[in-house]
Image (cartoon, grey):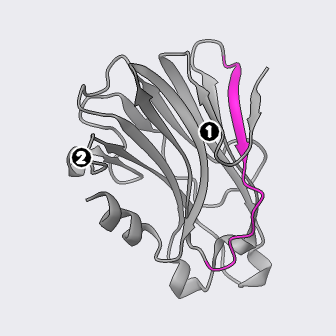
Amino acid sequence: MAINLQKGQREAIDAPKFVIGLGWDTNSSSTGSAFDLDASVFILGENKKMLSDEHFVFYNNLTSPDGAVEHTGDNLTGAGDGDDEQIKVDLSKIDSRATEICIVVTIHEAEARRQNFGQVRNSFIRIFDAATNADILKYELEEDFSIETAVEFGRIYKRNNEWKFEAVGAGMKGGLKDYLTKYN
């Protein structure tokens, strides 16, 4: 059974291969435009910076150079139940310099469409075992991000040769650009 995490809580990930599922619902009637939320992954080293530009995994770069992180593709609507986007992770393949994997969700063209995470609800991140499909953990964002256009849902980090997940739930109002600046 999955462990439901609260913001700031940490939990070990005991599966070498797992899938990160991200889901959300939007209120498109509030802006008149459809929402397009995008999941991105930043693979960082000890210095909290990306190992290379190719270690930024998103809809235009679906796989990390080592093949350890694979984005399954962009969902343009978020319609339906369950995961809206998924990222597959195989820690047995990850670059030995990697110490952190940050999972960020941004709103595509948020400024032009006048959209923010305050109009997004039922947001969650879950991690499940790739072999058994059993949920390992889940974190539901319960906060109201009324001005933010990007949210770091969580991070997977290495400590003492063990990989753990931390429920982060921190927003930025500058969108993806802010995270690219932070991690480059």
Please tell me which residue lies in front, 93 or 34.
93
Q: Amino acid at mark 1?
A: Gly
Q: Position of residue 70 (x, y in %)?
A: 41, 35
Quadrant the C terminus occupies: bottom left
Q: Position of residue 46 (x, y in %)?
A: 27, 40
Magenta span: 133-147
Q: Give yes or no for residue 140 being in the magenta stretch.
A: yes
Q: Give yes or no for residue 74 being in the magenta stretch.
A: no
Instruction: State the separation of the CA atoms marked 2 and 1.
Output: 21 Å
Q: Residue at x 35, y 54 (%)?
A: 60
Q: Position of residue 174 (x, y in %)?
A: 46, 77
Q: Which mark is drawn over residue 21? A: 1
Q: Position of residue 45 (x, y in %)?
A: 27, 40
Q: Earlier in the sequence, mark 2 or mark 1?
A: 1
| Quarter residue 11 falls in | top right
Quadrant the N terminus occupies: top right
- Number of marks drawn: 2
Q: Which residue is mark 2?
A: 54
Q: Secondary structure under badge 2?
A: helix
Q: Secondary structure under badge 1?
A: strand
Residue 65 falls left or right of residue 142: left
Q: Is residue 151 above or below residue 61?
A: below
